[in-house]
Amino acid sequence: MTLYFITTNKNKFSEAKILLKDAAELKQLKIDLDEIQEIDQEKIIGHKLKEAQKHKKRRFIVEDTSLVIKGMKGLPGPLTKWFIKTIDIDGIARLKELFGDGVTATSMIGYSDENGVHFFEGKIKGKIVSPRGRAYFQWDRIFVPQGYDKTFAEMSLEEKNKISHRSKAFLKLKSHLVKPKV
């Protein structure tokens, strides 16, 4: 089975290809889809999938990632990219001084096939720290998963893929793809 992952982010595509091996052939479509600004990730993903259907492929996946600071009641959430564009990663790290360092990272995948749209979510709790490690993804340098002392950016890709929010969501999608059809 061939799946088309709509993303312009080569790092997301590389991770997804590793996580979905043995379940599907993954191809990247570098299409810049219209992204509504919304706090509800399902609405964002649903809108992206509607946009994707205009391109006439059958099986699409799109992904949205968010970082929710506990004291900010849902923010920055799906707007994390815009927070980083305006106050930079250092600004996000400094928010812990006002709102505490408790944070949840979430990845939501939308999968569209002939049977409709399916959502798969992965979450991991952690804390915000001052930036450390290589810049691979936007906020990996400030996120330390609960029970660890390294940021995602300080971990190897293999170590990160064992625990990350994205890997949890993709493993749920993989399970859906390989489940026996009745």
Image (cartoon, rainbow, N blue to C red):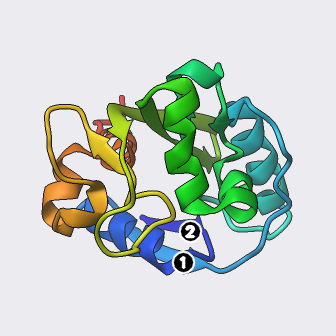
N-terminal of the two: label 1 or label 2? 2
User: To which residue does mark 1 refer?
Assistant: 28
Mark 2, secondary structure of its residue: strand
Q: How many marks?
A: 2
Q: Residue at x 66, y 38 (%)?
A: 76
Q: With 114 as the anchor, is 124 left or right in this view?
A: left
Q: Are marks 1 and 2 in contact (CB under 8 Å)?
A: yes
User: To which residue does mark 2 refer?
Assistant: 4
Mark 1, secondary structure of its residue: strand
Pinpoint residue 97: horizontal percent, then vertical percent: 51, 34
Pinpoint residue 106: horizontal percent, then vertical percent: 48, 37
Residue 21 appearing in the image: no
Pinpoint residue 26: horizontal percent, then vertical percent: 43, 71
Q: With 130 as the anchor, is 92 left or right in this view?
A: right
Is residue 104 depicted above or below 79 in this figure? above
Is residue 46 depicted above or below 33 in this figure? above
Q: Residue at x 52, y 22 (%)?
A: 70
Residue type pointed to by label 1? Gln
Mark 2 Cα-neighbour bin, 10 Å: few <14, some 14–19, many ≥20: many
Q: With 141 as the anchor, is 113 left or right in this view?
A: right
Is residue 22 depicted above or below 104 in this figure? below
Q: Quadrant of the C terminus?
A: top left
Residue type pointed to by label 2? Tyr
Which quadrant holds residue 149? Answer: top left
Which quadrant holds residue 104? Answer: top left
CA distance separating discs 1 and 2: 6 Å
Is residue 66 depicted above or below 25 in this figure? above
Q: Nearer the viewer, residue 2 or 80?
A: 80
Q: Nearer the viewer, residue 140 or 46?
A: 140
Q: Quadrant of the N terminus?
A: bottom left
